[in-house]
Structures are given as C-alpha cells and as structure tokens.
Image (cartoon, rainbow, N blue to C red):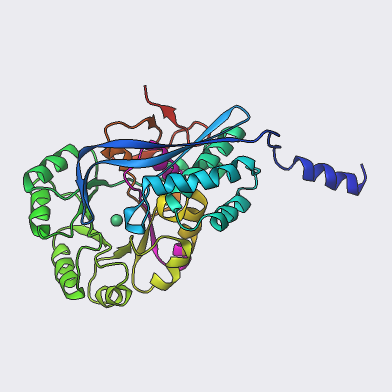
C-alpha cells in the first residue's frame, strides 16, 4: 500500500460510520412528582416538568433530559419549542461530529441550555452505546474517584426539617437550603438531629453584604463546610468584599452558568457549582471543570430536580470534581429510569454502555 492509500484508508476507518438514514429525535415533557413539597428562596412546588429527548439511530436509542430553569427565563414549553427547532438539525447531523453540532445548535437557538443539554446528553448516550462503553470510560475516568453526594433538605418547618434529616440518615453530608427569614431555626432543627458536616445554599437569599457576613460568621460556628451563593448573582463586588472577611469557602451557583462566566468570578468565589442544565450538557460541563481548576477554584457538580437521566449524565463526570450534589432524582417519587445509584452517599456509576440507564419496572 502506498502512502496515499494508507492515509486514505486510515481516514476512512478512524470512526465507525454513521448509518445513512436520519436519526429520529423525539421530545416529551415529563412531570416529576416531588416526595416532599420543595421550597427554596425561589419557589415552592409539588412537581417539576423536565424535557426528555430520545435520539434513535441504527437501532440504538440515546436518552437525554434537561430541567428548564425559571431563573433564566426557561420553561418546559420554551424548552420544547427550542427542541422542535434543534431536533431536525440533530437528526440530519453526523453524530460523530458532535463538536460541530454543539456550535450549530448555539447558532440556531440562543439560550435554552436545558433543552440543549437534553439533546446533547441523548447523543452521548447513543455514542456510548454505539461504542459499547460506559461514558466515564469513554472519558478516561475511574468511577471509583466519584465523590460522595450531599442530600438536599429544602426549606420547611422545624418539625418537617427534623423529619427530613432523619430520612437522610444514610447520607454522610447534608446540603441545607436557607435564605428566608427562618435560617437560624432551620439550622437549629438540623443540629437537633445530627452532627454531620453541612453545606449550606442560600440561593441568593441574603440581600446585603452585611447580612451575609453576619449569617456566615454564625454558620462558621455550626459545622458548615461551605456556603453556596450567599448574595444575588449580580453582586460580584459585594461577594469579593464578603470573601475577604470570612473563613468559609464561598461557591457560585446562580452566578455561573457557562464556561465564559468563570474567569470574572475567580477572585470573588472559592468554587463553582456546575450543572448540565445551566451550561448545555456534558461537553460544556467538562470545559467548565477544566477552566475552574486552571483558575484555582474548587469544582462541584450539581443538578436540578430531575430524573435519573440527567443526574446519571452528570454523575459520569463526577470522578473529575471535588464535590457532588447529585440528588435530584432522589427527591422525586416517579423516576422513569434508574441509572447512578447511591450507597451511603457514594455515587455508584452503572457499568452498562452509554449512560447505563434501565427503564423503571
Ligand atoms: Mg445552589
């Protein structure tokens, strides 16, 4: 074989060829029922609607999910409309050129990252199954490196908070939602049940830097490891001021959506909470982890309330991060799938190909 033929044959076989037929992309909205009424500073709800995407090609079905975020002007309906525009593009595209597809999706539809995440995750699930490898393996990760996940306790009455803490007994670390008027009461209720390490999320609930300073100094006496989004996302300067006055690490959540948000936050926060729904899927989340680490920030993978589809997708990247808050599927009563499992807080990744999902019986 001469050099030209060699190069030609190599180029042709570098990746498995996609089937000639178009993929079938389907979208549906799934209503997830919460086990407990879920209250944060933003809202109180009994259910959450997420968008589910299937990507079928060559007899293989990839599944994806995105949880639209009201905070960023998204809804299940707006996500569905976005996917109606993006679906035909994904159906025609070569699935092995996923990097190009990501750019094309951003050109066609602005924002709507939960919708894009749903489609992107479905494509990754398909790729993993087509290659016959779990996604963590495709990414070169050791599933044993996945950190423990916290279990989240939404804002509630002291009595219900105590009950939720008892129900969360198998989890070694809890994440407590605060940011309303009853923060001290909430922490006291938690501490009446357990001395576990806590992580606290204020969801932008404290409105001045002085209020946040007072709250954090108090939390430093309560066995709290770190605080998430104490001040509104726009208050970057105030957060920098706050960070100079407290020992407790401060994580950004609402302030950080996409890779390009991280550099300007690096001197105001100690870490970032990365969510597939905020950034648009697995590949942008990977990019965020690397950028955050390069800037000296700690990394956490978080999730919205969603089924095992989205949570398992995030869990495949968990071996890369310092902290995990991947419990969205544990807060719902009607999960249509099982995937990642949790054993005393430790994330156990499925060994099956792709995301490794199994439909619920
Ligand atoms: Mg948060």
Question: Is 265 on the left-hand or right-hand side of 18?
Answer: left
Residue 327: quarter of image: top left
Q: Is residue 198 above or below residue 18?
A: below
Which residue is located at x 41 percent, y 33 percent? 339
Residue 296: quarter of image: bottom left
Q: Is residue 132 visible?
A: no
Question: Is 341 on the left-hand or right-hand side of 352?
Answer: left
Residue 237: quarter of image: bottom left
User: Is residue 302 inside the magenta stretch?
Assistant: yes
Instruction: Looking at this view, name the residue that lies furthest to the right.
Output: 2
Q: Nearer the viewer, residue 264 or 189?
A: 264
Q: Is residue 69 visible?
A: yes
Q: Is residue 25 above or below residue 205?
A: above
Image quadrant where one finds the C terminus: top left
Which residue is located at x 32 percent, y 71 percent? 234
Q: Is residue 196 above or below residue 269?
A: above
Q: Nearer the viewer, residue 186 or 43?
A: 43
Residue 117 drawn at (x, y percent): 47, 48
Q: Nearer the viewer, residue 117 or 262?
A: 117
Question: Is 284 on the left-hand or right-hand side of 336?
Answer: right
Which residue is located at x 42 percent, y 73 percent? 264
Q: Which residues are magenta?
A: 292-316
Which residue is located at x 36 percent, y 36 percent? 30
Q: Nearer the viewer, residue 340 or 25?
A: 25
The mark total stands at: 0
User: Is residue 75 inside the magenta stretch?
Assistant: no
Residue 17 drawn at (x, y percent): 71, 37
Residue 57 drawn at (x, y percent): 61, 32
Image quadrant where one finds the N terminus: top right
Residue 175 drawn at (x, y percent): 23, 51
> Which quadrant of the picture is home to ligand 1?
bottom left
């Amino acid at each position: 074989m001469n050099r030209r033929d060699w190069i030609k044959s190599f180029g042709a076989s570098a990746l498995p060829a996609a089937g000639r037929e178009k993929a079938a992309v389907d979208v549906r909205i799934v209503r997830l029922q919460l086990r407990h009424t879920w209250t944060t500073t933003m809202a109180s709800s009994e259910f959450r609607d997420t968008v589910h995407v299937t990507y079928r090609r060559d007899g293989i079905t990839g599944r994806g999910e995105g949880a639209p975020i009201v905070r960023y002007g998204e809804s299940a309906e707006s996500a569905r409309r976005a996917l109606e525009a993006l679906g035909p593009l994904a159906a025609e595209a070569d699935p092995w050129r996923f990097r190009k597809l990501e750019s094309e999706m951003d050109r066609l539809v602005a924002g709507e990252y939960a919708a894009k995440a749903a489609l992107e995750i479905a494509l990754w699930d398909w790729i993993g199954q087509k290659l016959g490898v779990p996604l963590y393996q495709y990414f070169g990760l050791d599933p044993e490196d996945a950190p423990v996940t916290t279990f989240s306790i939404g804002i509630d009455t002291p009595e219900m908070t105590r009950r939720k803490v008892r129900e969360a007994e198998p989890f070694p670390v809890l994440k407590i939602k605060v940011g309303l008027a009853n923060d001290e009461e909430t922490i006291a209720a938690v501490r009446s049940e357990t001395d576990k390490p806590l992580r606290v999320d204020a969801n932008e609930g404290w409105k001045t830097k002085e209020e946040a300073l007072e709250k954090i100094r108090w939390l430093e006496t309560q066995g709290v490891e770190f605080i998430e989004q104490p001040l509104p996302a726009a208050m970057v300067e105030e957060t920098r001021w706050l960070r100079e006055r407290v020992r407790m690490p401060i994580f950004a959540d609402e302030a950080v959506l996409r890779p390009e948000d991280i550099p300007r936050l690096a001197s105001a926060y100690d870490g970032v909470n990365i969510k597939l729904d905020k950034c648009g899927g697995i590949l942008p989340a990977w990019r965020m982890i690397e950028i955050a680490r390069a800037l000296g920030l700690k990394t956490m993978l978080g999730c919205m309330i969603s089924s095992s589809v989205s949570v398992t997708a995030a869990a495949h990247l968990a071996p890369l991060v310092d902290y995990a808050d991947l419990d969205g599927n544990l807060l719902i009563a009607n999960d249509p799938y099982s995937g990642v499992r949790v054993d005393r807080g430790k994330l156990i990744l499925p060994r099956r190909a792709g995301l490794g999902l199994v439909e619920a019986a």
